[in-house]
Amino acid sequence: MMYPNQSASQNQLLQTIYESSFAACDILLYLDTHPCDEKALEYYDERISERKKALIEYARAYGPLTMDSVMENCGESWKWMEQPFPWEQEGECR
C-alpha cells in the first residue's frame, strides 16, 4: 500500500522488510520440526540478513522502524520521536 507522503523507494524498502520478516517467521515454523535441514537454515540466515540490511537502509533514509535500527538514523540524538506517526501522515485518518 502506498501512502501519499511515501516515495516508491520507501515503499519498496517496506515491502522488502515485510516479505523478509514473513519468510523468516515462516521458515522458523518449518525449522521447529526439521532443525537439521541445512538448506532451511541457510534460507533463514539469508532472509534475516536481507531484513537487517533493509531495516538499516530504511532507518538511515526515513527513520527507524524498530528498536534494532534506532541508532542507524541519528546516533547522537533521539530524533526518531520527531518523525510523524503513521496517523499523522497527510491523507491518513485523523
Image (spheres, rainbow, N blue to C red):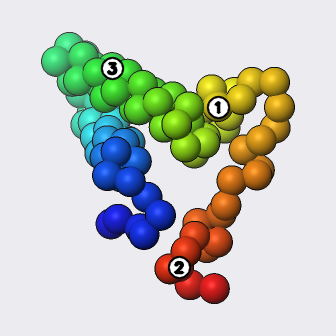
List the residue tagged with mark 3.
Answer: 45
- Answer with the quarter of the image where residue 65 lies: top right
- Neighbourhood count class around disc 3 (C-alpha, 10 Å): few under 14, some 14–19, many 20 upward: few
- Quarter occupied by the N terminus: bottom left
List the residue tagged with mark 1.
Answer: 73
Tell me the SS state at disc 2.
Answer: loop
Q: Earlier in the sequence, mark 1 or mark 2?
A: 1
Q: Is residue 24 visible?
A: yes
Inspect the image, locate mark 2, and give the three-letter code of the amino acid beneath it. Answer: Glu
Distance of mark 1 from mark 3, alpha carbons?
A: 24 Å
Tell me the SS state at disc 1.
Answer: helix
Q: Nearer the viewer, residue 4 or 12?
A: 4
Classify 26 as above or below 74.
Answer: below
- State the residue at coordinates (24%, 16%): 42
Distance of mark 3 from mark 2, alpha carbons?
A: 36 Å
Residue 49 x/y as whole percent: 38, 22
List the residue tagged with mark 2.
Answer: 92
Q: Is residue 91 left or right of residue 87?
A: left
- Neighbourhood count class around disc 1 (C-alpha, 10 Å): few under 14, some 14–19, many 20 upward: many
